Image (cartoon, rainbow, N blue to C red):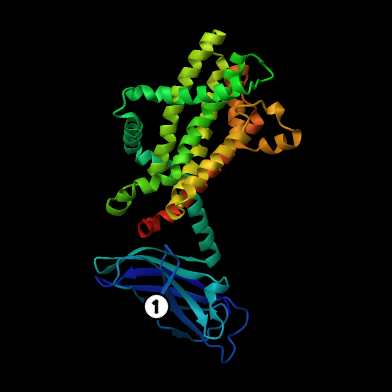
Amino acid sequence: MSLVFRNAQVIEDGDSRTLRASFDLENRSRRRQAEGDEVHLGWQLFDPHSGLFIAEGQWQPLAAAPPGTSSRREVEIQLPPEKGDYHVYVSPLRQETGWFYRSGSPFLLVEARVEGGRARLTGFRVTTLRRLVWTKRLGGAHKALTYPVLTVWRNFGLIRSLVRRDVAARYRGSFGDALWAVLNPLLLMLTYFFVFGIVLRARFGGDPSRTGFALYFLAGMLPWLPFAEAVGRSPFAVLEYRSFVKKLVFPIEIVPVNLAIAGLVTQAFALGAFLVFLLILRGGIPLTALWLPALIVPQLLLTVGLCWFLSALGVYVRDLGHVMGYLLTLWFFLTPICYPEGSLPPEALAILRKNPMFVLVAGFRDALLEGRAPAFGPLWKLWLLSIVVCILGHAWFYKLRKSFTDVL
């Protein structure tokens, strides 16, 4: 039996929690309703956010109607006293086989909200369960694409303050003060240079000199430093702000963004020092350095996405920070930063080229040292991967943040 809703109307019943839905119910079946085939009309109440079933209204028997005819029906919907949003599915049903809407038939969807002890109608339409599912999926996709951007846009001033405080707090009270923002990455890079360039005497094929190794090595460290700094700190990020999560209305999702942007500050100082070395040793900076934003933006997106994922997971897995220390060390040595990529066997090189840091390191060296633009093929794949990781990382954080207060 095929019943279709037409000319639907839904009104609020004064100051009560009652809604009244009226509509024409047309029988589009080609055959008459069989004798003993009892069809009823009813409604079910759902929570639109979780999809959980809440309550069910009284059933009305539907008298047999000839094919092609319609009858006017009215349903009274009583909403719960609790404040919130509600969805009501008005649909025919058979006691033996269940609700028609579950088998794909159209039903009347009524959207309402209870506030101040009265029902407020927010919308209604005739739809199907399949169409409703696709609408929710498209809405979820839209949120996934826009919420990461809105998170940064709406809280940009707060992020800027947190980054400033984070950078200043690292060196407050020390004799060098803000000078350590330059000295810290510089000393770290010099330490690696001493180990690999002087002690182990590693060299790059394009420039076998010691200064050549220093430039190639430092160029490879430029994207690694901010990435490793932010990702390494991210498992502890939410734990450091646990008092804000419990007591204040605070956008905790900006904390991982704070880590990634603070890493960019470190990268800016390191890049400034590198450009000075480049001027001294090579007498100039190539114009291809203008390609750096095309590398730094996906680096930032990738870092923020991983920070969102790891900071949310770190709330539940407290050993994650220690594990990430070992994984980052392994990641560093799987990336050709302190050795030329030509020293890798072809089988390993084919796999390691999938490493996003491999693409970033090669891109920085191309733009700063080789005088050419980064390879387009790996670059667009890096952009795509970074955007996907950023979106999924935010979705993961957004899903888990609701239960942070139960764990912290």
* Residue under the point 46% across and 25% down: 185
Residue at the spot 33% in from the left edge and 51% down from the top edge: 245
Q: Where's the N terminus, which quadrant?
A: bottom right
For the C terminus, give its image quadrant: bottom left
Residue 21 x, y percent position in the rendering: 38, 73
Q: Reply above or below: 44 against 392.
A: below
Q: Which residue is mark 1?
A: 74
Q: Amino acid at mark 1?
A: Glu
- At 56% from the left and 14% from the top, the residue drawn is 286
Name the residue nearer the viewer: 312 or 153: 312
**Residue 73 location, x and y as percent?**
42, 78
Identify the residue at the far top of this view.
283
Q: Position of residue 147 (x, y in %)?
A: 43, 46
> Is residue 15 visible from the viewing direction of this image?
yes
Q: Is residue 388 above or below residue 202?
A: below
Q: Residues within 10 Å of mark 1 (few under 14, many from 20)?
A: some
Q: Quadrant of residue 72?
A: bottom left
Q: Is residue 373 left or right of residue 112?
A: right
Asked whether, in this view, residue 182 is left or right of residue 335, the answer is left
At x 50% / y 16%, what residue is drawn?
275
Instruction: Name the element at disc 1.
Output: strand
Q: Using the rendered view, name the quadrant where residue 67 is placed.
A: bottom right
**From where the camera sits, is residue 147 visible?**
no
Q: Residue furthest front?
A: 199
Q: Is residue 282 above or below residue 86?
A: above
Q: Position of residue 374 (x, y in %)?
A: 62, 25
Along the line of sight, the residue nearer the viewer: 407 or 79: 407
Give whichever of 168, 16 is nearer the camera. Answer: 168
Looking at the picture, tell me which residue is in the foreground, 266 or 153. Answer: 266
